[in-house]
Amino acid sequence: MKVVAFNGSPRSGGNVETLLWEALRPVEYTGHDVAKFNLNELSIRPCQDCGGCEKTGICVQKDDMTLVADAIRAADRIILGSPIFFFGLSAQTKAMVDRCQSFWCERYILKRPITGGPDGRKGLLILVGGMKKEVGVTCAGETAKAFFRTISVPEHDTVSFLGIDQKGAICGHPTARDDAYRAGRRLVGLEGG
């Protein structure tokens, strides 16, 4: 099974990255093929809404999104991790999501959705926010839901934590790391849903 993981946090070694790697532990332990992307380290220009992908389903811009798109296309499981900034996904995450307009065109205009392997395509969303209001999870979650559906991932699980702001604070949460680990196990079928 091919798994791709996106860390959308700009903070290296931060709360999102900690949970993302925790979710990947059981995935890597069982020998699945894992590709990891730190979106903050990639060069992904914003979508230009140029319409260049409408006839082919391929973005005309040439940057690191080409690698990301190839990984998305090949994946059976996709993990998206992001901090919640101003009730939404981080800018790094949103730039990648917006560039998936080419997948939207491929799926909805050209009627060529990505087909899944024998186990289908599933996703996992990991969100961490400093604010305690659930609206951040709701808003970021809706954007992530649109992303997952656009890339032909019909179902995904969400693991979210609020009131976590300082770097490393997630390690003090009583269940966060275990929750992420179990979500990773469920993602690859090691635990029931």
Image (tube, rainbow, N blue to C red):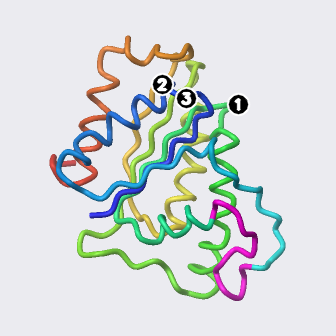
- Please state which of residues 69 and 49 is positioned toward the viewer in this rendering: 69
Q: Secondary structure at mark 2?
A: helix
Name the residue that disc number 2 marks: 15
**In the rendered structure, which segment of residues is drawn in magenta?**
53-65
- Of tags 3 and 2, which is closer to the observer? 3
- Of tags 1 and 2, which is closer to the observer? 2
| In magenta segment, residue 55 | yes
Residue at image coords 56%, 64%: 67
Query: Dot 3, crowdedness within 10 Å: few (<14), some or many (≥20)?
Result: few
Residue at image coords 32%, 26%: 177
Query: Dot 1, crowdedness within 10 Å: few (<14), some or many (≥20)?
Result: few
Name the quarter where the N terminus is drawn. Answer: bottom left
Q: Secondary structure at mark 1?
A: loop
- Numbered-mark total: 3
Mark 1 and mark 3: Cα distance apart in space: 20 Å
Mark 3 and mark 2: Cα distance apart in space: 9 Å
Q: In the displayed structure, would residue 155 be above or below residue 86?
A: below
Q: Secondary structure at mark 3?
A: loop
Determine which quarter of the picture holds residue 61. bottom right
Report the amino acid beneath label 2.
Answer: Asn
Relative to 126, 77 lies left or right? left
Name the residue that disc number 3 marks: 12
Q: In the displayed structure, would residue 152 be above or below residue 89?
A: below
Report the amino acid beneath label 1.
Answer: Phe
Relative to 13, 122 lies left or right? left
Name the residue that disc number 1 marks: 86
Residue 123 x, y percent position in the rendering: 39, 55
Prevailing secondary structure of the magenta residues: loop
Determine which quarter of the picture holds residue 136. top right
